[in-house]
Image: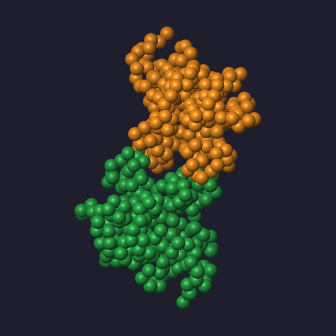
Chain colours: A orange, B green
Amino acid sequence: MVQQMEQMYEGKAKIVYKTDDPNLLIQHFKDSATAFDGKKKGEIKEKGVANAAIAATLFGVLEAAGIKTHFHEMLNDRDMLIDNLKMIQLEAVARNIAAGSLAKRLGYEEGVVLKKPVVEFYYKRDDLGDPIITCQHVQELGLVNEDEFKTIRDLSFKVNDVLGRFFNERGLDLIDMKLEFGWDKDGQLVLGDEISPDTCRFWDTATGEKLDKDRFRRDLGGVEEAYVEVLRRVTA
Amino acid sequence: MVQQMEQMYEGKAKIVYKTDDPNLLIQHFKDSATAFDGKKKGEIKEKGVANAAIAATLFGVLEAAGIKTHFHEMLNDRDMLIDNLKMIQLEAVARNIAAGSLAKRLGYEEGVVLKKPVVEFYYKRDDLGDPIITCQHVQELGLVNEDEFKTIRDLSFKVNDVLGRFFNERGLDLIDMKLEFGWDKDGQLVLGDEISPDTCRFWDTATGEKLDKDRFRRDLGGVEEAYVEVLRRVTA
């Protein structure tokens, strides 16, 4: 049994702790939620518990499809044992249906189905507002080289494909999804962070109802219920 | 001699007229200047004359290097006879040194020399604020296909290379440059629009002095003089 050690990092929705094994960390899921670059803040009751369980299940789905993730096991209902990855300072966003910044960028109505999935990259820099960047910017910044960039992009498409089908079978449309990757101790590319209604958009296939953090962002009500509903479908 | 016909389009710095030849247009260079998506407006005395002469010279330099441009001839000191291109709704921005939005996006100080030149693409949509877009967005929008995108990118690098050397020989550093392309009547990719201190950043190699529209954007004074100085060097 690993021992939790000092806090390494506190983010908007999670706290990461070291353990007595240098290759393992504990990721603790909080109830706090932020939106609009931290301008909006709040608590979503039991969000941490729901997101931890959703993420654990989805990491399992991905592992079963041959995609390496940082997930080891749940230690309790909020603490996830994970690989200690060297994180890449990028957010990959896979998109299937226009919403959020893509809808704004391209002048699309929310809900327009994209001709084919798109993967965008954002530079993970809160102080810069996490700007969108291209492969050339990534190389200029020295974040990863061109081949690694393409590998991350291809892997993001694969995650999107596997989970898109998984959600479809559960009556959910996967609109878009943020992914973060890192390098493990063997230099392998591994999916990290979390996959949850905080980091994805899900719409009910039948009704179009939003079942994700947009309920919080836009004050739509029924926020806790949406997270619980996603958990229910994911673990069904 | 072509006859000027009705106005086809009025932009921030130019007016385009039809002619009695459907394959030819007249591009008229105005003195008006705008910045910050049109929020700042002004006149720069004799800018139209300087920019027309600068652009005409640079198109000639590019043609000599085997790059097709829309330029035919100057009809007078503000009116340029050009091909009637089917314009692509993209701005390609070639960058050599960090300035403007790239400096902001990557968190770079202005003046940082990039490891290698970068070409960015912006969706030419005033109503959306001309957002930066990727190859995948371009395909989603149906603006050009992937091969055409790569051709435009490669051609932008070539224009940047040819003109960068041309300016260096004249004591100017080419910081960045906006390019627009279109298809001619034979379906060939052709460089259009203009190349001038309105659409490029130039810094004096010796002193670092800005000799471009940033003097207008930032109220640095000596705006007219900068355009005249660039014209003097380009035609020297």
- x and y percentages locating residue A84 in the rendered image: 46, 24
Q: Quadrant of the C terminus of chain B?
A: bottom left
Residue at horizontal 42%, vertical 48%?
Answer: B105
Q: Quadrant of residue B64?
A: bottom left
The residue at the far left in this view is B207
Q: Nearer the viewer, residue B226 or B121?
A: B226
Residue at horizontal 53%, vertical 52%?
Answer: B133
- x and y percentages locating residue B143 in the rendered image: 61, 59
Does B97 sit above or below residue A162? below
Residue at horizontal 47%, vertical 85%?
Answer: B75
The residue at the far bottom in this view is B1
Does B89 sit above or below residue A204? below
Please indicate whether residue A233 sits to the left or right of residue A86 in the image.
right
The residue at the far right in this view is A206
Please indicate whether residue B185 sits to the left or right of residue A188 in the image.
right
Residue at horizontal 67%, vertical 25%?
Answer: A229
- x and y percentages locating residue A51 in the rendered image: 58, 24
Does B235 sit above or below residue A120? below
Q: Nearer the viewer, residue A185 or B125?
A: B125
- x and y percentages locating residue A173 in the rendered image: 69, 36
